[in-house]
Every structure is written in C-alpha cells, then in structure tokens.
Amino acid sequence: MPNKTAKTAAKATGSKTAASKVASSKTAHKTAPKAAAPKTPVKTPVKAQAVAKPVVTAKPVAPAPRVEDKKPLTQRQGFKTNEFVVYPAHGVGQILAIEEQEIAGARLELFVINFMKDKMTLRVPTAKVANVGMRKLSEPVLVKKALETLKGRARVKRTMWSRRAQEYEAKINSGDIVAIAEVVRDLYRSESQPEQSYSERQLYEAALDRLSREIAVVQHVTETEAVKEIESQLAKSPRRGAKAETDAEADAEADGETDADADGDDAAVADEAA
C-alpha cells in the first residue's frame, strides 16, 4: 500500500511538473517577442516610374478672338481715296487713304492727304471735314468765273498795307477760288508798272500757286500751262500800264476830296452846336 501511494504521489508530482513545464513553455512562447519574419523587399519597377507621367489637367483654352477681315475704307463724307481735294490752308492735295487710328483711347477715322509739291502728308479726322473747310475741286464753270475775274479791274483799298495784307491772306486761306483770283488780280504788276515790294510779291506768288494748281488739276494740264493761261487773262485787264497809274491818281484825288468834305461837315456841325 505504501508503495502504491508513493507511486501515485510520484506520478501526480510528475504530471504537475510536466504541466508546469508545458505552461511555462506556453507562457514563454507568448511572452517572448516574435522574431520578425524576414520580409522580401519589393522592388518598385524603375522603368514603370520613369514612364509614368503626372496627369496634367488641361485648362480650358479661351477661344482666339475672331479677326474680321475689314475691307479698306474707300469713301467717307462724300470723299474717296485717290481723289484730289482742296484744303484751305495748304491748297490742292490728294487723298491717299482713309485709315483708323486710336488716339487718346478713342478710335478715329482719318483722311490721309498728300501735298506732293509741299512734300507733306496731313491727317484730317473725317468728322472735322466741314470745320476745316475741306472741299472738292471747283467745277469747270466756277474755274471759268475765276478766270473772268482776272480780267476785271484791280481794286486796291486805300488803307495801311498791314491791314490789306491780312485781308489778302484771309482770302488765300479761305479756299474760295474766286477770292484767290481777286488777290492775284489786285497784286499783279505788269512790266510797265512799278515793281512789287517783297511782302506783296510773296502774297502774289502764294495766291498764284494756289490758283494755278487747282486749275491744272481741273483742266488736266500742267501747272506751267495753267500759269500761262492766268497771265494771259491778267494781260486783258483794263487797268495796266500808264492808264492804271492815272486811274489810281484819280481815285486818290477823289478820296482826298471826300475826306475834305467830311472834315468840313464835321466843322459846320461843331459851329452850330457852339
């Protein structure tokens, strides 16, 4: 009996010991950190990275402004390109083009006028044509009237030259072909008449140039031929040579008598008032 008891006790002790070993091994297995399993490095395909491109979102492209094919301007305010016109301050010129320009933020239409003889180009706003007095060439009937004016009697006012010079300049720059013909007629001097002063000669040549250029364009002749026609008309004037001087003296005497009569009348009025 004692042996059986001892064996039983030994078995029990042994089973407990085995159980404790198993428990300790499990505990140790749980407590001990797990060794990290060696990871197989995953290689990123370099080629794929090189080939891959970033996706760029396309921005909406604004539609390009439509460029309208504008036809070149050929006519405005009754004037057209390649037409000869008269600009009062410069005489006869030719319209080369009608163009648009932006000036001070505003779009303007301009006549491009070339004055070949003066070697000058002028740009005139189409809206200002009436203000500056630009006009078409004179009709043949008006040109004939101007030529008839040259054959008339010269009318020279008995005033200071400075005042007469201003009047002559105003007529020349008026653009009126008949008024310009009057200046030519009044300032013309024949060979039998006294020579002109320098200022008279300048005004005469300016008026003659304006008149001859317009007549040349209207009649389709050269300026030299136009000048010859003007001078031939001036030669027909009744006031040329000695007779002109006699008439001038007569006018002067008449003016003197008129002034004397006016002074006498003023004196008589003053006496009556006294």
Image (cartoon, helix red, strand yellow):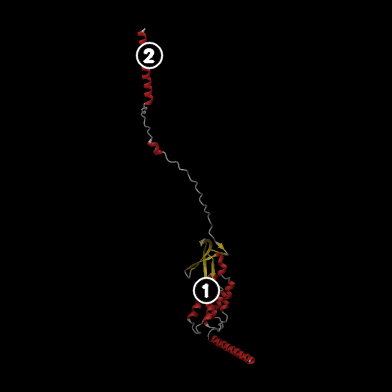
Relative height, residue 226 to residue 252 (above, below): above
Q: Residue furthest top?
A: 1
- At horizontal 50% and vertical 72% (from top left) the residue drawn is 223
Q: Disc 1 marks which amino acid?
A: Arg
The answer to which quarter of the image holds residue 265 is bottom right
Q: Nearer the viewer, residue 211 or 234?
A: 211
The answer to which quarter of the image holds residue 125 is bottom right
* Coordinates of residue 97 in the picture (x, y in percent): 52, 63
**Left or right, residue 40 beside residue 244:** left
Q: Residue furthest right?
A: 272
Looking at the figure, which quarter contains the N terminus?
A: top left
- At horizontal 59% and vertical 75% (from top left) the residue drawn is 145
Q: Nearer the viewer, residue 67 or 207?
A: 67
- At horizontal 52% and vertical 68% (from top left) the residue drawn is 93
Element under disc 2: helix
Q: Nearer the viewer, residue 162 or 215?
A: 162
Q: Disc 2 marks which amino acid?
A: Ala
Residue 135 shows in the view: no
Residue 24 shows in the view: yes
Q: Residues within 10 Å of mark 2 (few under 14, many from 20)?
A: few
* Coordinates of residue 118 in the picture (x, y in percent): 48, 70
* Coordinates of residue 199 in the picture (x, y in percent): 49, 80
Relative height, residue 41 to residue 55 (above, below): above
The residue wearing badge 2 is: 12
Which dot marks residue 210?
A: 1
Q: Residues within 10 Å of mark 1 (few under 14, many from 20)?
A: many
